[in-house]
């Protein structure tokens, strides 16, 4: 897709809030017929703007995990070093998110673990072996303050 118009952006905003709403309800909210709305969603999916759908799990009602936020500083910030690091990170499903950052560290990673022992294993077997890593700084979350963000809001 070349660029997103106002309707596409509204569709994406509403799907982020509740991807399970019916196509008819979504179409009504963005001012389209259901068939036109579904056609736009299919185009957004086919172009890769929408990469998939997921379920948000409430940790109080499911197996509890701890989010660990990891700041990574690389030895060098050359294009080759960044590319090698990013390629390596993509090989590990244990790493749920990886952001290239500005500021004090080069990357911010997020992993979910059940306990410190599991994180120690990830640290030893994955994080410490990533190419070009100079420093690893990890912080364990206490709770997600914005866990209710997935609920519809106006």
Image (tube, rainbow, N blue to C red):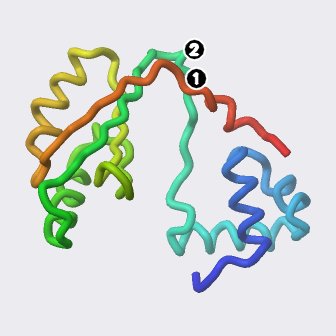
Please provide percent x and percent y for residue 139. 35, 28
As drawn, 112 above or below 107: above
Instruction: State yes or no: discs 1 and 2 in contact (Cβ < 8 Å).
Output: yes
Neighbor class of circle 2 (other Cα within 10 Å; few <14, some 14-19, many 20+) is few
As drawn, 69 above or below 51: above
The quadrant holding residue 57 is top right
- How far is disc 1 from disc 2 in space, using C-alphas? 6 Å
Q: Which mark is residue 61?
A: 2
Residue at position x 18%, y 57% in the image: 85
Please provide percent x and percent y for residue 116. 26, 16
Residue that mark 1 sits on: 58
Which of 62 and 72 lies nearest the eye of the viewer? 72
Q: How many marks?
A: 2
Secondary structure of the residue carrying tag 2 is: loop
Residue at position x 68%, y 30% in the image: 148
As drawn, 68 above or below 71: above
């Amino acid at each position: 897709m070349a660029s997103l118009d106002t309707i596409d952006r509204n569709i994406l905003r509403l799907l982020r809030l509740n991807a399970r709403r019916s196509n008819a309800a979504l179409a009504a909210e963005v001012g389209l017929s259901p068939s036109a709305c579904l056609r736009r969603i299919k185009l957004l999916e086919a172009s890769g703007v929408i990469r998939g759908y997921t379920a948000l799990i409430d940790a109080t009602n499911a197996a509890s995990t701890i989010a660990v936020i990891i700041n990574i500083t690389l030895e060098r910030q050359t294009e080759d070093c960044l590319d090698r690091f990013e390629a390596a990170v993509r090989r590990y499903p244990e790493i749920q998110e990886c952001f290239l950052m500005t500021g004090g560290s080069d990357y911010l990673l997020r992993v979910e673990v059940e306990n410190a022992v599991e994180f120690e294993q990830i640290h030893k077997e994955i994080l410490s072996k990533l190419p070009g890593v100079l420093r690893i700084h990890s912080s364990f979350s206490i709770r997600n303050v914005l866990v209710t963000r997935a609920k519809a809001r106006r």
